[in-house]
Structures are given as structure tokens and as C-alpha cells.
Image: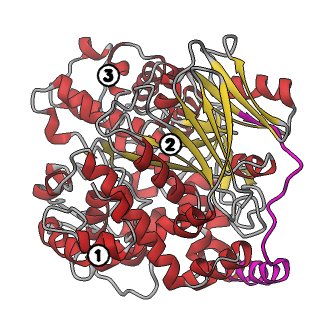
Amino acid sequence: MAGRLVRVNLAAGAVTDEGLEEDLVRRFIGGKGLGAHILYGELPAGISPLDSRNLLVFAVGPLTGTLAPGGSRTVVCTKSPLTGLWLDSNCGGRFGSTLRTAGVDVLILEGAAPAPVYVLLTDQGVQVRSAEELWGLGTFETTSRLRELHGAGCSVACIGPAGERQARIASIIADGRAFGRGGAGAVMGSKKVKAVVVARGTGEPRPKDDRLFARAVKEALNEVGIHPDTGGARPRYGTNAILSLIKGAGAYPTCNFLGRDFPGLATLDEEAVRGYFTQNRACLGCPIACSKISRVNEGEYAGAWVEGPEYEDVWSLGAQCGHANVAATIRGEYLCDDCGLDAISAGVAVGFAMECFERGVLNEFEIGFPLPFGGWRAEIKLLEMMGRGEGIGALLSCGVREAARVIGRGSERFAMHVKGLELPAYDPRGAVGMGLAYATSDRGACHLRAWPVGEEILSTKGRYDPLSSEHKAELVKSQQDWFSVVDSCGLCLFSTFALSPDQVADLLYAFTGFEEHGSGDSLMRIGERIYNLTRLFNVREGVSRQEDTLPERLLKEPLAAGPAAGNLPDLEGMLSEYYLVRGWDAEGHPTVTKLRELGLMNHDH
């Protein structure tokens, strides 16, 4: 790695260029791992996420910007304003690769600027510049103006109006792609930072052993190319490649997890979404090209376009709200990206509001218009209000936990979140391992901390029964550790569908030359260290067994029809087994024995 950590004190406008200790890279790799070490060590316990003392950390991994397939990822780490807990958010595209050409591995934004600014990085240095004229603009216009100033080749990570007003589900949009989930955009807005702009520099990441790295890259590219997912379905359908399989297994949620049918659901599949694709788009150097540009050519949303729509957003802005109108989903996802809202959380919030309307908890006067399930025109209106912070939209952009707290009237029962983060597009009643993954994720309900549905439903091996709790604790624990490695080394998770831990170790060791990165087993131990450290962060903020749970609906209301009808996850049983496998106590706290084993005693709370 380049070994540079740059710290920007926004209040003072001061920039400090620090070195990156080799031992930290050996023990935490990069990306998420370094972010966890920094935040746990520097953040005081109990501070508000929107306090100026919170940090916003951009970090790449050793493989970011290299020829490794999927080596394009960057993470943002902070304390989440949505959950009050640990947050790391991951983004592909070219932002991280460009950051590395400027010679920076970690960028820390601390304090808050007195007026709107943007941070400019070049390989000549870092500057803090006024963003007064950009404040109030959407992310696409902001990106366009900054590229006019600093060249078309620069990379821009910015917030929209939602982040400026510190909406708790605000995202950061980097060159059209999102650091979504958890509200990092609100933290950026609280610091009065409109954008981070990185001009492409002259530096390139150089491996420790060029020949060894080239050989590892060649082998990895071959594995990615021949794998049925990364070499076939995903390039053709993007992230929607799994849609039919999840539906067929009864794990595709509809109508705020009520499990209702609606017109068009039967024909909503990957082919229906693919009909809107106009071109493929890949992250820098990636052979998979899972991203798609979609455009609506006719109807009331003619001209609407988006980079996507992704599987999660086809669900959150479609089936979650009781419709299968892909054109409306494309329009809705564009609105979320431009105003800077996390599209998963936004869609879940709309579905929550639709159920509130249906039950009479919210009425037409309070909303401003009727909001039934299936009403995509009303959904688009509500998304616009959420982006602008108007009316009921301002409350919903704070997330469903906060919205339910304010609305009351029993709405807490159908606010679909874990620890404040809205659920994604997998129903744990049809894939019970996902329930344990949501409950124990370090950032709240998340499908990217562990993805047991891949083994429960999508695997051709048929090893795990999706309706059984058996072996799910071991599976979730193992995936959480592994995904922590992936998010620390700078690889895309999709490329690791085709690569084993040992193959990733071949890439990482050839690049860093560190023995600690030399085998799959040693990487898994590092992943376990990182996951325990983020757990320590959350325990310090008050998380215990009581918070490791699921919405009441998923524990007490079985689905009425489909392959998962009548099934409910045995969360308590899985949780006890999970804590045992993790080496945590019965309340979910890492034990002294486990911390000593992982070399984390100096992080002990």
C-alpha cells in the first residue's frame, strides 16, 4: 500500500499527512479493518453521530485500483446517525482507484467546516475549497460542475439535498454509485462537506512481487470468467440475476413483508428488468460488468434513466410497495440517487407509510394524498417529498424506527428494521439463516455482512435447508468473518463468489508480501479480529442480546402461502448457538479469552 493517511481538520482547514503503520496493515489489511481500528480508538463512546467529533473515514484496501478482478472498492466508516452504531458503507466504480493514484489510502474528515466546502485531493496535495455555490444542488449536477472545474477524469463523492439537511437515510453518491445504507451522507452534511473530489494522479499501486501478483491475477480472472454467476448470469442480468430464484423459494418480501400477491408479481423477473437495459457498465478494471444503464422509452416515465435498477431497488421501490412497475422503479431510483437517499431504506419507508395508510394510522390529510399499496404515482410523490424534506417525507427520511416512534399508534409493530437499519430484500421466514445474519450484523439489518441465502437457496450443492436452523450459526459466523476480509482488501464481493479464501490470499500476499496475508486461514483470523472489533464498538454503545433481534412480524406472523408458508425462524436458538461459536458470552459480549486470542486486549472495553 502507499502507506498514506491524510487527516483534514475541517474547522481549522488544516491538513495533516500521516504515515500508515505497517503493523496495522498486517493486522487489519485496509478498508473496513483500518476504519474499525481508527473509529474504535478515536471516537468517544456515546457521542451523537452528528456531533462534529464524529469522524468520516474513507479507506481503500491493498487490492483497490489493481488488476485483481473486482479490485475497485472503497469503504466509508463512521458512527451511523440512523442506528447510533458502527457503520461501514462500500462503493465500487472508480473513486477508490482514483484515490490511490493520488497516493492516499485513508482520508479522515474530522470536525465541521463553518460554511459549505469540498475537499480536493491531487497528487500534489489536499485543499479545502468553498462549496457555497454547490450547496442545494443534486448529486448529478454537483458532479457535473466539479468535473468542469477539475477535469472529466476526476472522481467525485458528494451529497445531495438529503445529506445537506442531515436526513438519517442520506447516502454519499460517488460518480453515480452509492455509499448507501446507514446515513453516511448525513454525517458528511453535518460537517458541511458537499463533496470529496479526487483528481487522477500519477501514482499507481505497485505489488511487492510483480510476477507473483501477475500470476495470481491471471488465475483469478480465469476463475471469475468460468464461474456460472460471475461469468454468466451476472454479466447478463446484473444483480437481478437471482430474482426468480428468491421468488421461487418464497423468500421475496412483498407489501412491507405482509407477503401479499399483487398484479404483475408473477411476471416480475430478471428478463422483465433486462428489457430496460441499454448498456453494460463495469467498475474500473472489472470483467463482470454487473452494472447496467437502464432507460424508459415510453409511457408516463419516458426518458427516465438510472444506473441500475439493482435487485434491491427493484424490490424496495417495487414489490415492497406492492407493484411491479419497473419504469416507476427506475424513476424512483434516479430520484434517490440525485437527492442522495439510500434507495433500500427509502423504499422500506414508503412501504411502511403505505401500511400505515391502509390501517388508518396515517390518513390522506396527514400524507397529502392517498397512499395505497400499489400506488406508484403516490410513491414517486412521496420520494420527492423525502428528498426535499417536505411534510411527512421529512419524517420518513429519518428512517422507519424514528418515524414509528413519532407516529406511534402501534406502528412500531410493522416498522421493518433491525437496530434502526431497514431490512433488505430477503424474507427470513423463507431463508432463516438471513434472520440470524440480520440480527447479528454489525450495522443493523444487512445482506452484505453475511449472505446465507446464497447457500440456502442459490447454491447448486443444496447443502443447507432454508427452513431449518441447523448449521446456520457456523455459516453466518464464517461469512461475517470472510466478508470483513473482502471489505478490507478492496475486492468486490461478487468476484469472491468465484474465488476461494486461498485464492484471495494469493492475490493479497503477492501484493503486500506480508506473511499474515499468506493463506486463507490467516485471512479468516484477521476477519474474525475485525468483526469482533466492530462488535466491541457496538457493545460500547449499549448493544447486547436484546438488540440482536428481528421485527415482531418475522418472529410471530408466518406467511400464509408459498414454499415457506407457516415457517418462522427460531432466532433465540440460533442466537445462543451463534454466541457459542463466536466465543462470546450469553449476552453477546466478546469474552476476555476471545479478545486475547485475537490480539484485541488493548481494545477491551
Start-end of magenta stretch: 197-224
Q: Is residue 328 left or right of residue 63?
A: left
Q: Give the labeled residue for mark 3.
A: 395
Q: Give the labeled residue for mark 2.
A: 180
Real-space CA distance between mark 1 and mark 2, rounded to the nearest whole angstrom: 28 Å
Real-space CA distance between mark 2 and mark 3, rounded to the nearest whole angstrom: 19 Å
Which of marks 2 and 1 precedes in the sequence?
2
Place of residue 519 in the rendered image (x, y in percent of width and height, measured from the top left): 57, 85
Place of residue 192 in the rendered image (x, y in percent of width and height, measured from the top left): 56, 20
- Tell me the quarter of the image containing the C terminus: bottom left
Tell me the kind of residue under disc 1: Pro
Label 1 SS: loop
Q: Are marks 3 and 1 in contact (CB under 8 Å)?
A: no
The answer to whether residue 325 of the structure is visible from this angle is: yes
Residue at 58% x, 66% y is 23
Tell me the kind of residue under disc 3: Leu
Label 2 SS: loop
Q: Is residue 416 left or right of residue 210?
A: left
Residue at 35% x, 44% y is 320
- Tell me the quarter of the image containing the N terminus: bottom right
Real-space CA distance between mark 3 and mark 1, rounded to the nearest whole angstrom: 36 Å
Q: Give the labeled residue for mark 1.
A: 466
Which of marks 3 and 2 precedes in the sequence?
2
Which of marks 1 and 3 precedes in the sequence?
3
